[in-house]
Amino acid sequence: MKMLFYPARYGRLIDRLAESFPTVEMIRIHQPEDIAANLPGVEAMVSANSVFSSDVGRAVREHGKALRWMQFTTSGIDTALKGGVPDGIPVTNGGGMHAHTVAAHAFSLLLALMRRLNECGTARAAHQWLARNELGPTLVTTRGRTMALIGLGSIGQDIARKAKAFDMRVLAVSRGGGAPNVDKVYPRERMHEALSEADVIVAATSYDASSHHMIDAAALAAAKPGAIFVNIARGSVVDETALIAALRSGQIGAAGLDVTEVEPLPPSSPLWDMPNVVLTPHVAGSGADNNDALYDVISVNLRRFLAGQKFERVVHGPNPGA
């Protein structure tokens, strides 16, 4: 069988899969315009959510007539669904694969804000030593603080575990039940209650129509004044215009954002220059050790595919097999 990788940026991973599955021909595609010519006869395709544009989706639907399975290297597939994944085939993702990495990044953003690393970095670039007596009293810590987690999937649960290690009280807003390390769970309809108690708000929910702008002006107004907001979910989970206004007024004391509504973030966005904002370029799930985790996810499903068994992590389409 043939398995196509686009983009083929996981060279070592593909080499490892080729060694483990010698009967599978691994096709590496680097440019989207090369997809159409290489898709005929391909039964499985591995791609990333961020690159699955409408043009890629059109090429896959028109030329991937032999496709029987699509595997995404990411947890979210919202861009891919807009791009148009083929109907009638199972689509699997990397859900939970990067939970530890994303959770650690959330805490990196949180601690950078609490310990004012932005200001320290600016002073360092100017070769200035911040006065300890002035800086020290403005720093805060996690101990005894309350975190409100929006979303309690694998990433949210890992953040909750880490929050407990940092001596925090943990509330969660979830459509499901409770989880270890969570002190209280609120349904989405009562999210404002959770926000009103929280010193720290972390968005970790999946993105779909129901979560679009769920953190809006009303939610931010309901938050505890001066709360820190961290977003490692999707940019459109929060109304960015309302967030900027809340940051300017002090209703939200600071924000750590790995995602924004428009990516890359436009140069004109006020977020670039706000001293109470820490920005990272959608890298929360990235890491040098991701290849090993991704190998495990793909290899399990590839074995199941070859054996005619049901897939793990199906997020769209049917799940055929034994």
Image (tube, rainbow, N blue to C red):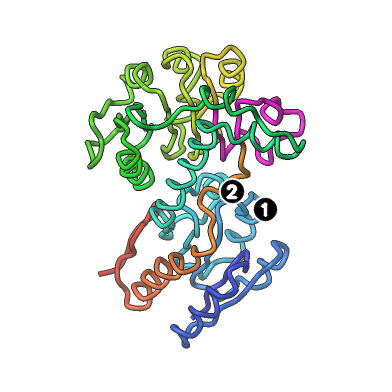
The span picked out in magenta is: 255-278
Q: Quadrant of residue 143?
A: top left
Rendering coords of residue 127 (x, y %): 75, 38
Question: Residue at 49% of width from left, 81% of height from top?
Answer: 1
Which element type, helix, strand or loop, lies under badge 2?
helix
Location of residue 246 with respect to 286 vertically, above or below: above
Rendering coords of residue 278 (x, y %): 60, 34
Of the residues shown, which amino acid type is indicated by label 2? Gly
Q: In front here: 70 or 281?
A: 281
Q: Is residue 262 magenta?
A: yes
Q: Quadrant of residue 224?
A: top left
Looking at marks 2 and 1 on the same chain, the residue that comes earlier in the sequence is marked by: 1
Q: Are marks 2 and 1 in contact (CB under 8 Å)?
A: yes
Q: Is residue 189 magenta?
A: no
**Magenta stretch secondary structure, dominant:** loop
Location of residue 229 with respect to 73 vertically, above or below: above
Q: Which mark is residue 55?
A: 1
Question: Residue at 61% of width from left, 65% of height from top?
Answer: 6
Rendering coords of residue 201 (x, y %): 42, 28
Which element type, helix, strand or loop, lies under badge 1?
helix
Location of residue 280 with respect to 64 vertically, above or below: above
Q: Which mark is residue 285?
A: none
Question: Residue at 37% of width from left, 42% of height from top?
Answer: 159
Location of residue 249 with respect to 129 vertically, above or below: above
In screen coordinates, is 110 left or right of 169?
Answer: right
Rendering coords of residue 182 (x, y %): 25, 35
Q: In front here: 176 or 26?
A: 176
Q: Quadrant of the C terminus?
A: bottom left
Q: Which mark is residue 83?
A: 2
Of the residues shown, which amino acid type is indicated by label 1? Asp
Q: In front here: 287 or 62?
A: 287
